[in-house]
Image (spheres, grey):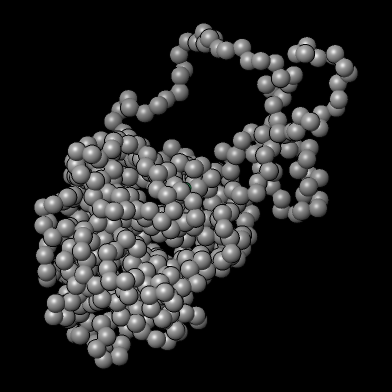
Amino acid sequence: MTDLSRRNFLGAGGLALAGASMISGRTQAAGLPEAPTMTEATMQPPLYPTSGPDYQPVVTLNGWTLPWRQKGAWKEFHLVAEPVVRELAPGMKAHLWGYNGQSPGPTIEAVQGDKVRIFVTNRLPENTAVHWHGQLLPNGMDGVGGLTQPHIPPGKTFVYEFICQKSGTFMYHPHSDEMVQMAMGMMGFFVVHPRDPAERRVDRDFVFLLNAFDIEAGSYVPKVNTMLDFNLWCWNSRVFPGIDPLVVRQGDKVRVRFGNLTMTNHPIHMHGYDFKVTGTDGGWVPEGAAWPEVSVDVAVGQMRAFEFVADAPGDWAIHCHKSHHTMNAMGHDVKTYIGVNMNKTAPAIKKVAPGYMPMGGAGMGEMGSMEMPLPDNTLPMMTGFAQFGPVEMGGMFSVVKVRPGLAADDYKDPGWYKHPEGTVAYEWTGEQLAEPARASPPDSGVKAAEFRAIDPRKRPVRAAGGHGNH
Ligand SMILES: [Cu+2]
């Protein structure tokens, strides 16, 4: 495709596509809209509409919005299902399946009442089909292979046509060899904006999908039959510290939307604010009924949206509150060594397992600052550094960075928050403090200093009657 015809195509999508150079075109058979592709894993600028009703576009964490072509009354999109390489965070790439060069696929944005025509080309080695999760549409457009349509064979293109009947938050994903294709990363976000741009208007609107992979240390391809014990908990197929910050101008009205295509629920918790849950699977929550929360649980297959006014500047953590979901692969299958003196044990283990590193005799926090030898293409389980030291996180964790005076479309990482003097927790160096009152614990027969991870049933048997607790 020539530069000129590409410009014509992008004209439908918008001038604001500053990252256009990163979108490489593909020549399609006559009549098909271009299927742009993206390989950059960083968040692309919002794609403003240049035709049709106005709206405030969303930004996709570590992702992008699929440009479309207006053809008569129809907005035409082109998805290509294909194998992709996705960097999960610097230091690890995964061999996945996705759409248009990436997992997840691009976000689709439309307006309530839009007629959308979505071409889906299958470049996978097996059949696929796309389900438009949450959309109200004719049964035959619902994308359930075998049930509502024939599966799309490799090499073929199918067309989906429907009217976006209501605004809200939706997803798309395969309904054909579904477990394998979702375990391989096939999914995308779908946002339908209200017809009236003043309705539910916000200044910044962030979207991401929750997804999970099970990739063994040192390997690239997810295990596709894992049911629960995934080891990489992702937002848009990225893990901390690879997940973009949510950059916000102080005073902005902000919406965060997410959909859950993992196999478990995720209580998403944001620090520093309470927020209102304004959107669920079925649509918008009436304003008077929106619940105040600081965490919102999102079940398997659900979508949620919450909103807040960003009045408090700072670097506010946002994360899943299941603590093993803020850890990367190496955090799984680690034995508990609290209280164990590894100085004695480690040399013995090192003899049989060279390169072995003792973990966590005093908790695992020390892991956050350690450079431990890892297999290639493997992320540390706890990682990331900020201005005060190691963050000791991984997985589903990012930072909402609220700053005064940003430009309306400035999503660049502003660096770490400069705290006003006297507003950071500090070490006490004054006079010795009196001992605080404390509860006296029941006697378990072990002194606190000797708490360790041993099975009490395996302790030597005491002589009968020899224990004060009886
Ligand atoms: Cu979680």
The residue positioned 60% from the left and 52% from the top of the image is 330
The residue positioned 40% from the left and 48% from the top of the image is 298
Taking 150 as reference, is 309 left or right? left
- Could you tell me residue 313's position as x and y percent? 26, 37
- Residue 159 in the image: above or below residue 298: below
Q: Quadrant of residue 4?
A: bottom left
Give the farthest residue toward the right: 463
Q: Nearer the viewer, residue 234 or 164?
A: 164
- Residue 278 in the image: above or below residue 139: above
- Residue 316 in the image: above or below residue 374: above
Quadrant of the snapshot with the C terminus: top right
- Could you tell me residue 78's position as x and y percent? 30, 78
Confirm whether residue 150 shows in the render: yes
Taking 209 as reference, is 336 left or right? right
- Residue 14 in the image: above or below residue 62: below
The residue positioned 85% from the left and 14% from the top of the image is 466
- Could you tell me residue 248's position as x and y percent? 25, 47
Confirm whether residue 39 shows in the render: no
Quadrant of the snapshot with the N terminus: bottom left
The residue positioned 52% from the left and 55% from the top of the image is 232
Q: Nearer the viewer, residue 237 or 426?
A: 237
Task: Count how many numbered circles sit on residues in the image.
Answer: 0
- Could you tell me residue 50's position as x and y percent? 13, 69
Q: Quadrant of residue 253?
A: top left
Q: Nearer the viewer, residue 445 or 144?
A: 144
Q: Nearer the viewer, residue 416 or 152?
A: 152
Give the farthest residue toward the bottom: 30
